[in-house]
Amino acid sequence: MGEAGAPGSKNAALPILAATVLGGRSVIHNCPDISDVRCTVEILTALGCDVSYDGHTVTVDARGISSHVLPKEHMEKMRSSIIFAGGLLSRFGQFTAHYPGGCKLGERPINLHLSAFKQLGATVEESEQKEGGIIVAKAEKLAGDKIYLNIPSVGATQNIMLAATLAQGTTVVQNAAKEPEVTDLQNFLVAAGAKISGAGSSIIVIEGVRELRDTEYTVMPDRIVAGTYLAAAAITGGAIRLKNIVHHDMRPIVEKFIDMGSFVTLEEGAICLTAPQRLHGLGYLTTQPHPGFPTDMQPQFMAMLACAHDNTTIEETLFTSRDKHVPELIKMGAKIINRYSKFFHVNGVPQLNGATVKAMDLRGGAALVLAGLAAHGETIVQEARYIQRGYQAIDSDLQALGADIKYFDPQAKICD
Ligand code: EPU
């Protein structure tokens, strides 16, 4: 049985790093060594923060912030750059930003973020409501309010928490996202002196405070990297002991591995999975906001289901085009039919075949790596830089589990 450990969570580290603009000196441990964290460090530096980064600990001194303009080139690279907006607005009463880029998963508007800022008292002007457009927001003072989100958006929930942290009065977010990464942001902010409660439920209450204090915080483990490593064992009929995980956060993912015929035991902070020779199909699998099955595991499960017994219909409900991996899996022999854009009928085949395929987003790229592990012959995944946005060591971690995998061009590891 191979052993691996989950690194710090990308989707927790990025908003926490953005939140450091609210405080003085913040020391953030367990940040993953990935290109999105490096991009976030560059944004902090461009704003005027004094930042040091040793690969896992980022130390930010935000007292010298001199700019409220989020750099265009960074915003185009990474969707989560928009999470800087809430903190800048709360602390300095202004920000200028471009529409964020990031993985192309379909329409990804930021209307909920901006309308919440307006509800808290900001004026928001947009030159164009699409990539390339500029957003200028200003607020004399922000005042708490009741904000209902018609979609439990993770990013909008986080931006409201940040904007409301130093606002006057109390803000209540209704239909808030319940993802564990939202709770991790709350935990960081509370450690720094914010008054926030309710994260993990659909109602979050933020009582504005005057300022935050210096703080030191350790980011939660990455449940999606953990799920991907479990999938590496499962798709190859292998076994794994995975350390540094939070059982409760992993539950929506682990239940599906059990349904697919894997044997799972829980140890303190670890999980052991033994897969059958060939996984079973699931019949139907739908992505849902937490505590449902996460969209960030949909491509990896599609790779597993593509070579499982029986058929599965996958319904992707969060994003309109999280499907760039589908034609690539088909190149490897998968039988997948797409209906009404969000339904994918996956007919499991006994064997996938190695091929040259292209990653077009982060999790889709990880799915192609998984398919390559199970496939007969060699698989080359081009554009591996997408994978490096979220996986700090997929090559060495999978090698330690017995996989034959390497980055073709070591320079590709230094990306974006
Ligand atoms: N949405 C709107 N308006 C908004 C905001 C969101 O219509 O103002 C819609 C989106 O278009 C989408 C849905 O709401 O259809 C959910 O989007 P959400 O805002 O929850 O996603 P996000 O904050 O942009 C984060 C993660 C994603 C993850 C989603 C869902 C980070 C940095 N990103 O994105 O992670 O898929 O939540 O859980 O936290 C990944 O890691 O590969 C990744 C894409």
Image (tube, grey):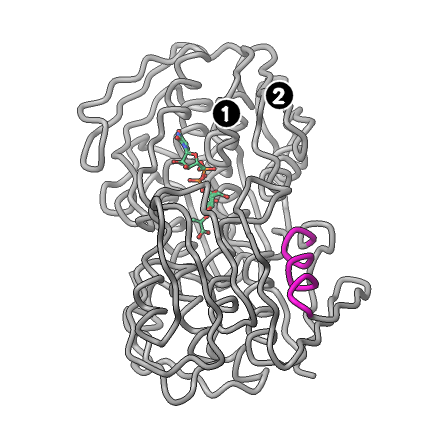
Say which mark, if any, is on residue 206.
2
- Which segment is the magenta one? 251-261
Say which mark, if any, is on residue 115.
none
Say which mark, if any, is on residue 160.
1
**Residue at the image point whose x is 51% and y is 85% from the top:** 403
| Earlier sequence position, callout 1 versus callout 2 | 1
CA gap, disc 1 to disc 2?
A: 9 Å
Q: Position of residue 378 (x, y in %)?
A: 36, 87
Q: Position of residue 374 (x, y in %)?
A: 48, 80
Q: In the rendered image, which quarter is residue 356 located in?
A: bottom left
Instruction: Tell me, yes or no, whether the highlighted magenta stretch contains residue 256.
Output: yes
Q: Position of residue 389 (x, y in %)?
A: 39, 60
Q: Residues within 10 Å of mark 2 (few under 14, many from 20)?
A: many
- Badge 1 marks a residue whose secondary structure is helix
* Amino acid, disc 1: Ile
Q: Nearer the viewer, residue 268 or 107?
A: 107
Q: In the rendered image, which quarter is residue 38 located in?
A: bottom left
Q: Is residue 52 above or below residue 5?
A: above
Q: Is residue 227 above or below residue 238?
A: above
